[in-house]
Each structure stands twice: as C-alpha cells, then as structure tokens.
Amino acid sequence: MDRGWWWKFGMIVAVTLGTIWFLVPTYYSLVVLDRAERNNIAVLEQRLPAWAPPAKYRLNLGLDLQGGIHMVMRVDTKTALQKRTERRGQQIATYVNDKKLGEVTADTDPERLELKLTAKDPATMDAIQKEVLATFTDFSLESREGATLVLKPDEGQVNRFRDEAVDQAMLVIRRRIDKWGVAEVDVRKLGTDSIQISLPGRSNPEQAKELVGTTAQLEFRMVDDTNPQVFAQMFAQNPPPPESKITLTQDEGFPQLSSPNREALLAYAKDKAPEGRDVLTQCVANPVKKNDCIAYRSYLVDKAVPLTGESLAGADASVSQMNEPEVNIAFDPAGAREFEKLTEASVGKRMAIVLDDNVHTAPNINEKIGGGRARITMGRAGARSFEEWLGEAQTLALVLKAGALPAPVTVGEIRQVGATLGDELIKKGSLAALVGLALVVVFMAIYYRKSGLIADVALLLNGLLILAGLAFFNATLTLPGIAGFVLTLGIAVDANVLINERIREELSHGKTARAAVDQGYDRAFWTIFDAHVTTLIAGFILFFTGTGPVRGFATTLIVGLLASLFTSIVVTRVITTYFVHGRNAQSVSV
C-alpha cells in the first residue's frame, strides 16, 4: 500500500474514531445514567471521563421517548388590556395635572375598554383634548360631552397588543424553563391565545406549574392606612357567615380579616371596600409544609397601580447582614424615576408588593429610595429552615428575573406522559431500526458480494455520523426522528445500489475493472448528488416551517443526507478503488 492510500485510509479511520469519541456523552446520558439523572447536565459532567467531549454535545430524547410533562397555557389578553387601560388613565391624569393644563379625573370602563376624562373646569377641556391626543397616540377620541372626554385604545394597537402578548409570553416562558435547566423544551403557539409546552424528562407537574404557570404580574400599590378601622367596621356592620370562618385579627397594630378560605374572604369583602380601594389577601405560610397557606389575611390598597413589573430590570436572591434571605430588585431608568417619585411622596406609608393579586409583603417606606433599587426581605419564622427560606427567595428571584408576563396566564391543561410508554417506544423504535439495518446489510452482502460488504461498512459509518451530527447540534431524538434515521439509511443504501449497478453495466460493456469502477462512480455522482440536494431542499423547508416532531424529523433527515453523501461518494470509493487499483485487480466482486 503506497503513501497515498495510507493517507486516504487514515482519513476514514480518523473520521470513524472521531465519530465514536464524539458519541461518548450521548452514551453516558442514555445508557449509563438512570432516568432521573438523564436530563441533568451537571451530573453528566461529573460522570464523563476527562478525555470525553463536553457534556453539552449529547443527543436528547424527546417527550414521546422518555416521557415528561405536556402543558397548555392560556393567555388572558382581555384582562391585560383592561389593566393596561386603567394604568394609562392614571398616567394621562397625572400628565395633565403636571402640565398644569387643568385638573382631571380618570375613570375606566373595563368591559368596553373606554377611558373617561372629566375636567373640573370645562373651559380647559379644549387644551386638554389637544395635548392628550397629540401625546398619547395609542388612544383615539370616542366622544366628547361638555367637560367629559371619552377615549378608546386604537384598534390597531389592541390587535398588536394581543398578538405581541402571546409572543412575549412564549419568550418569557422559554426563558424561565431555560433557567430551570430543561433540555430541548418545545414551546409553540396553539391557536390565537394558547401556548403548548413540552418538558421532556420532567415528572413533577406541580413543580412545572409553579414555575411556568406563575404569571408574575408584579405591582407596587400603596396600602391605605388612613382608615385603619375599615375592616373592624366592616366586620361589625356585616358579620360574616360562620361557615366562612372569617375572623378579625391584629397585625402590626391594624385590624385585619383572616380566613383559611381565600375565596370566601374575597367574596365577603367584595363591594364593601371604600371607593378607589381594593381588598387583596396575603398568604400566612404554613411553618411546617412548604408552599401551603394556613390562612389568608386582608389588605386594603389603592386601586391605582403606579408601578408594575414591566419596569423591572433584574432580581437576585441574597442573604442580608441580619442573616435573612432577601430579594434585591432593580428597575429600568423610567421605572427608577417612577419608583423614586412614588417613595418620595409616600414616606411613612406602607407599600404593598403584589404578585398576581396576592400581597407578598408590605414594607414601610422610611425614606425616598433613589437609584432604582429596592430590597424584599423574606424574613424567617416558624419551623422552616434557613435553606427553605433561601430556596423560596431564589424561586421568587428566578420568576421575577425571567420577566413579567404581559398578560395573565392560566393552566388550561397539564398531563404527564408516562415513562413506561417512553421505554416501550424506545425499545420498539430501536428494534425496528436495528432489524431494518440488519436485513439491508445481509441483502447487500449476498447480492453484491465484496462490494456489498464495502457498502455495509459505509452504512454503519453513516449511522454513527448521523448520531454524532445530532449530538453536535444538541438535537432531540423523537419517534419521527427515528423514522428519519431509518429513511436516511435507506437513501444511503440506494446510493450504493446505484453505484454498484452502474459498475456492473460498465463491466457488461467489456470495460476493465479499473475503468468500470472509475466510470461507475463518475457517472453515478451527479444522479446521487441531484437526488440528495432536492431532498435536502425539502428537509430545510420542513425544518424552518415545521415545529416539534416535524422539525425533529427534518433535522435527522438533513444530517443523514449529508452523511450519506460523504459515505457513498468518498468512503466506498476509497475502499473500492484501493482493492481494484491498489492491488491491480483484474475483476470486481459486484
């Protein structure tokens, strides 16, 4: 064997060994690790040998193969539009008063999404109307009657908000899941207002619901302490029914309503709050059982929402100098100005930090807070350990850092795909692939003899290259992906059949072994190339337009076609040419 053949065979051996080496993380992930550790990249990094590739280059199993959680989230764009209109009304009223155009009050009709501005002095309405419509272009004039101006959100803006709310919710949910460390999550739009989520390898629906389903509608609202006896008067004038278990308690010197049933407490307080106020609840945590509330207590807060989580720039959990877990939050420049203005005007008052209409905490504002930074102290109480409180702070920071959703999101459906079903699909899919591959190998060896054996070697290398390619792109193998794997092996065999039949045809025309091999490969090349390129085009179209299993099939198909081109045109030609040219063979076993 001369130096040129050594180089060619060395290239093939190097590609083969490199491919096997690259599949080490996939082997450890799918064979060595058990199901609970399979999706934990930190565990995989610890188990891998030092000489192995990075753990991120591994092949993942999809939801249909390893089981997991399937969720459908519904985006409540209607409620988001209502709250947005209410906040816009407060902003417009503040803007008009600050500009000294006049004094106006803002009222909203949530169902009709109408904003009503009423001027104290009717003579100022012309200037107010001109300035408001020129500045707040997302609202249009609906009607005007004397000192009352009725505005409505622009229809185009409303439609754009609905579409963007779902798209933004998808991005936020994906960021949260990425921070959770789930591999190859599938998040896609379902209909006009729903999001479908697949979490492969996860087995705790409640944990997924807690992270993904938490809408994190963060609001900063002032607590009304001007009438501290409002709940005591409410309790005395309208005693609650005994079955509601509502009692009157004291907290920080203020009378509050308390009940183990949140819905009963809110139903009792409904329509009893003073004008311009809302009754919200706060969870009294169970000191023993995490994420459980032993009771709920009431808070009277301003209906106006001066600042929301939309202005939040970041959140991090840490431990204070008093050795208590806390969450540090930071606002963007616009939010920082609003927060500073709010705290300056509310020194000595309590500010409720509200997550999803639940008061998380209500600290006192001791001084103006500048710089756009604040701190939520978690505190420690009961029998819960420091680690449990710190974990709660980290969960809260994670949800806030991932971003507030533009609209409330509810869980429409959540179900777990059984692990036994995944094992069964893996076994049956793998068995089908192996049986099909074995039958093809045997057929090629019998029908094409030595040339068939060479094609079999290329076919096995083709399969390894496909798996290595999928691992390089950190792709997810699904049941349709296995189908794509088998299909590409069939295409690779078809290319070798075409070459061998072409060589046979050249031999039948009286060509020598050398000439038959050379012309067989040369004349079959463009046919093979054209067939692969046209199929590649279809694969790329499926990849860029499809989602979920369709995209997984397309990924496997594309990688397989590229591997097939290399093995059928390069690998088999090098080996076949060596046996004919390198050994001066007078015949070809084909």
Image (cartoon, helix red, strand yellow):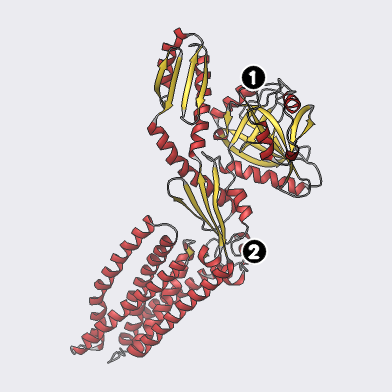
Which residue is under mark 1? 345
Q: Select label 2 or label 1 by which is in front.
A: 1
Of labels 2 and 1, earlier in sequence is: 2
Which residue is under mark 2? 46
Instruction: Out of 483 and 140, give the one closest to the viewer.
Output: 140
The amino acid marked with disc number 2 is Gln
In the image: residue 473, left or right of residue 586: right
* Horizontal and vertical percent position of residue 346: 66, 21
Instruction: Out of 249 and 486, give the one closest to the viewer.
Output: 249
The amino acid marked with disc number 1 is Ala
* Rendered position, 445 above or below 178: below
Instruction: Out of 529 and 386, give the one closest to the viewer.
Output: 386
In the rendered image, which quarter contains the N terminus? Answer: bottom left
Q: Residue 149 appears in which quarter of the rendering?
A: top left
- Label 1 crowding class (10 Å Cα cut-off): few <14, some 14-19, many 20+? few
* Rendered position, 474 above or below 267: below
Q: State the mark number for residue 52.
A: none
Residue at the bottom extreme, as displayed: 586
In the rendered image, which quarter contains the C terminus? Answer: bottom left
Mark 2 vs mark 1, CA separation in Å: 54 Å
* Rendered position, 196 above or below 509: above
Q: Residue 377 appears in which quarter of the rendering?
A: top right
* Horizontal and vertical percent position of residue 213: 58, 47
